[in-house]
Image (spheres, rainbow, N blue to C red):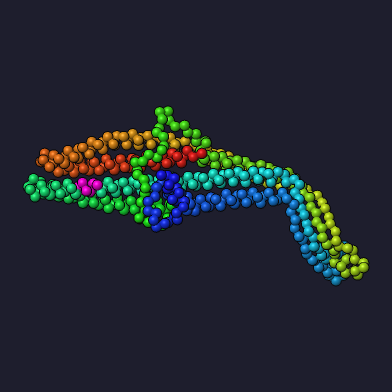
Amino acid sequence: MKWLWLCLALCAPPFAAGQTSLGLDSCLVIALRNSPQIRIADNAVRAAGLARSELYTTALPQVSAVGDAIYIPVPPRYGYDPAITDGGEVRGLISLRQSVYDAGLRTLKSDQYTIDIERLGNERRLAALDLTLGVKQAFCESLRARAEVLLQQESADQLEGYLSLVRRLYNGGSASATDLLKSELQTSSARLALAKAREASLGALIALEELMGMPPDTSVTLADSLGEASGAPPDSAGGEVFDPAATLDVTVAGMLVRRSMLDEDITRHERLPEISLFADAGYLSSGDNLRLPSSERVNGLGYEVGLGIQFPILNWGATGLRTEQKEVATDDLRSRMELLRRSIASDALRLRLQRAGARERLRLLRTNLTKAGDNYILTKSKFAAGASLSLEVLSAQQALTDARLAEIQTLADIRIFEARIERLNAR
């Protein structure tokens, strides 16, 4: 059945008029497909890959064209020293520069980009997991609200039926006006509760559609029930095996620490020399040479090659200060990662305890629910026989409704706890 919903969601238009019933799998597929956050995360991964490719190009020979013409007046009236200026310059060159040794900076930056690509890919997964959790919670809330509507409808129908009984007894003189007024009042309250539940159900459905990127459509129905098992295993006696350091969130935090450590290395490598080869070929001539007759001019075509080296001698400790800044930033990220690890460990334990408590609460509620149902039927029968008060019947019906509402809320809580535990366990 799940695969059927997946195929329908992938093959059909997202807002097809005939698509009125959606399961959880369909909602997740539509939400992931329409999510701007996922597209932003995909773009970030692609941008990091392009940046790494751009870095690789700097290891290849860099070729450029140079062309300029400079006019400088010749003394005696105006002009610089002719021995230096030669009356100006004309050149048109093809220049080539090849890095021989870059102090290891390119390798370190490449490692950073590799970490960034992996980290952004994991952050994309985290964005999908967060969206999945949001959709599951909204889907569960819609199911809970729908179940509450059905319950309030049934409660109102019960009270309508009981009100009819009280009216017959009142007309026959077996019930008092007080019994009739109390029954009418509680029936009216049940109708108000039903209207409020319907309003909440529509609001929950619209919130789910917003997460899915769909326009509000109140004709959509959910093909699921709140009581269906989510497939999560029950709590074992020894507790679940959980390692917060292995979670995806902590893994991403660790990547940020590794990237910051590479920042430290890059800063330290600023002290090392950079070596490059350079060459150019083309035409280069001075203004004085161009003023000579063509037979006396020097041919300006030629080339040159050279080796350049550059290294810092004194920057007044700026490199050391930048290195210390990077070390402080790395230590800060390590502290944040440790706080995140502790927070995830605490959240996981708290959610497991809450889920276990909710399951035990559900067991007790279902036992009480059976008793509340029997009590309502018995009290209603006794009232019809004149052996109990109308107030007792109304109290029994309210107790039954409250017990069923508590069951619905507990079922929703269990599903939400399981969804949150699944999100925390992401590897």
Q: Is residue 156 magenta?
A: yes
Asked which quadrant contains residue 273, the reply is top right
Residue 323 x %, y %: 65, 43
Name of the residue lying farthest toward the left = 173
- Left or right of 264 on screen, residue 419: left
Say if 211 sits above or below 408 in the image.
below
Q: Is residue 69 left or right of residue 50?
A: right
Image location (x, y in percent) of residue 317: 69, 44
Q: Which residues are magenta?
A: 154-159
User: Which is nearer the eye, 18 or 422?
Assistant: 18
Tell me the residue at 51%/45% (across/down): 125
Drawn side of residue 65 relative to residue 358, left or right: right
Q: Nearer the viewer, residue 193 or 312?
A: 193
Q: Quadrant of the N terminus?
A: top left
185 versus 349 height, above or below: below
Q: Seen from this angle, which residue lies furthest bottom?
A: 77
The quadrant in which residue 261 appears is: top right
Residue 386, position as x, y percentages in the image: 10, 41
Which x, y percent locates residue 254? 56, 39
Residue 229 visible somewhere in the drawing: yes
Is 402 rendered above or below residue 14? above
Which residue is depicted at the point 45% across and 54% down?
12
Residue, far top: 238
Q: Is residue 216 visible?
A: no
- Report how many numbered discs are placed on residues in the image: 0
Identify the residue at image location x=7%, y=47%.
173
For residue 259: magenta? no
Q: Nearer the viewer, residue 79 or 233?
A: 233
For the stretch drawn in magenta, the main secondary structure is helix
Left or right of 421 on screen, residue 396:
left
